[in-house]
Image (spheres, helix red, strand yellow):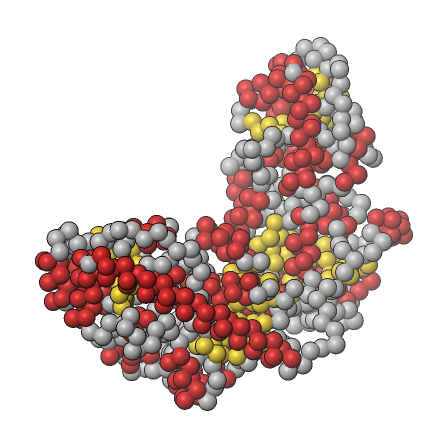
Amino acid sequence: MKKVLIVSPTPSRDAFAGNRLRVRQLGLLFQERGYEVVFVYIARESIVDRERVEMAEEWNRYYEVAYDRTTERKTHDDKNLEVDEWVSADVLEQVRAINEIEQPQVVLINYAFLSRLCVLAKDWQTTIIDTHDIFANRFSELKKLGLPPSFFSVAPEGEKKALKRSDLVLAITDEDACYIKEAYGIDAIVVNYIEKNEPVKLARSSKIGYLSGNNKINVCSFVNFIKSQGVSEIACKLKGLEIVVAGTICADSEVIAVANANKNLIQLMGPIADKAKFYQAVGVVINPQVSGTGQKIKSVEALSYGVPIISYYEGLKGVCDEKSTYVVADEAEFTDRLDKFVTDSEFRREYSKKTRTIWSEYKKKIDGQADLLMSAVSETAKTKLIPKKINIESCKALLITDFPFWKDKNGKSARVDALVKSVPDSVELHVFAFCSIGRIDRALIEEKYSKVVFHSFKEYEVSEAAYFEERLLSRLTGIERKKYSRAYFSAIQEFLKSNTFDWAIIEYIYLAYLRFAVNFPSRKIIDTHDVMHLREWTFSKFDKKHWLSVAPREELQLLDEFELVLTIQYEEYEYLSMHLGQKSLVVPHIPTKTALKKRNPSSQKLRIGFIGTDSPMNLDGIRYVIPMLGNMYQVGKFELIVAGSVCNNLREERELPFVKVLGVIDSPESFYENIDLTINPCFYGGGLKIKTIESLANGIPVIGAYEAFRGMPVDKKTSLPFIAVASESAFLHAIEALCSDRKYLEEMQACCDLYLDEYFSEKMYSEFWRRVKL
């Protein structure tokens, strides 16, 4: 499928302002013509999570690029800006990375002041700039209207430079296209604003509607209109006349003041969610704008709903000819037409009929313009230097770790093991390990990961210090300097002298300093395992000291250095998404499919299991829960079976009659085959509890503290294979319930597979590897 990358400094949702509507409708046009739309929002405006979700749902893919608006230099009287000064090197780099990931055939850039992004396009990509408006000396146009300069203004030579960068230029009106041709010698394609709405059933109402965004031109036009003599006269003549104002313009202080002064005439509704209902409730809409630039999208929107509009030519540019009888010439004609529309039913009927004719003709024109645009895109593509093979399906990636995940039996190793096993054939994966890889290791690696190439840092040890070490250390953050290893850094640099990769994946944030190595891949991924400052916080709640201490700001800034930031659980993903936007990606631990088996509960006593390493979280948790179980113990009712290195510290507990200690075991599967239920009493920590997922993968339900299920989605419509408890009594009640009601236990066991298939199946890796592929 063909693909278009749309880059915009304004979001496509909520579409309450004209520029947002324009951006959205052009995207929909490309979708209708068979394109996959990738929307890149340069976050210049504040939006809420709901708007992000709506954009992600509407477009095939959605990215958000961080933007610091405080660095913008504003337009002042008699001064223009440089055409590129609103595009920082950071924005340029972020969009470059997205373009590399997506490799679209077409790149559509909104606004001339983002034209610097055209330099990122490949020889075979077609670039388009949608101008939206003319920005040459725009401050002077605003001064003519008695308005202060705002937004962006540039010298004519700057705008010409910008538009020359792209293959195609779009103008929103014929007037704009003529100016671009005469001033710059560039042929612009006119694509008027496109709007496709279902016409509403017109109300027999005398209400007059005005729906508008909050900008100075709209405010000035509306306030002057209300204060005009004609409006005063018609308001006196027509008692009960009401002007209903909606949109963000209602928040402007001048609009509020004029509404308060005319309380019997003006009703302010504020922003509205359903535009169709608004248009259905009014008899006619107005657009009193007498001057400005660009097309007035609010007018086109009203016409698309089939609602008549009374407007000067400025409000109907692109829709009607200036000499059209549908256009009003002056204030007297404006108020006269408004009077007739409210009082003369025959005039209202004929005017509504003419509105439908105007709109029908406009739609035909738009269809022709859309055809012309698509034809121009197609013809331009034919002139491009198309490489013989654009490799967007395969890539070469490097994963870097400091622990032998292929043989260790703990949560972090299980996570990396599953990630490496999921690598598709189209990705050539190499693993660089900061540990020895002996003969036995090689045999195990060959058996488990036949498609993956492993390297030990021991093969690349060098005696000299890392290159540029002094300069390097000055660039590192506190946590990086603390964890810095000269041996590791020198080895990775030596390795990269003769090995090149498209991507690098670093396991754990404390190895982030490796990104400064010479020849390190420019595209970088960090697999967090845990957001360390969040994990440290959970430890502190129980007066526990975490092994790694890092300030929230430092960690977030460090993570922001990476193109992709992987989280292992959903809660941390949502947290990082608020700070890092689209850089964050949840890739949860996925248990192996071979472990998914149904279990038959014992007909005798309830077999409760716990398996874990000798970490403080596991030891504290199991020591907390054993006395609780002892208080409710009855012979033959249940037994607690404990496995793993945590057993090494259970010297007194192993003597209890209901506790069976297995110690370290070779096969976790054999452990799960002989239990009915697992517990996870870890009440502090962080990240995803792998033991919880592995238990479910073996068909065994889990009872545990809330920490045991941190980051695991809960859908109220779906039965859960686990029980989260908040107190000792709740824990004991849950154990008692499952001891006495084996049918309940069987129902929970049946939910294990369903839950894992929904949230922790191999399909979860597909988005990650898609992002990794070039």
Q: In this view, does 772 lie to the left or right of 4?
A: right
Residue at position x 39%, y 61% in the image: 304
Closer to us: 437 or 327: 327
Image quadrant containing the N terminus: bottom right
Q: Position of residue 103 (x, y in %)?
A: 64, 68
Q: Where is residue 708 in the image (x, y as percent from the top left)?
A: 61, 34
Closer to us: 23 or 149: 23
Residue at position x 76%, y 60% in the image: 427
Q: In this view, does 642 lie to the left or right of 175?
A: right
Closer to us: 71 or 305: 305
Residue at position x 29%, y 81% in the image: 140
Residue at position x 69%, y 78% in the image: 386
- Residue 527's place in the image compared with 10, above or below, is above
Residue found farthest to the front: 346
Q: Is residue 459 in sight in this rendering?
A: yes
Q: Position of residue 484 (x, y in %)?
A: 65, 59
Examine the image and state in which quarter residue 330 appears: bottom left
Closer to us: 370 or 151: 370
- Residue 599's place in the image compared with 66, above or below, is above
Q: Is residue 297 in sight in this rendering?
A: no
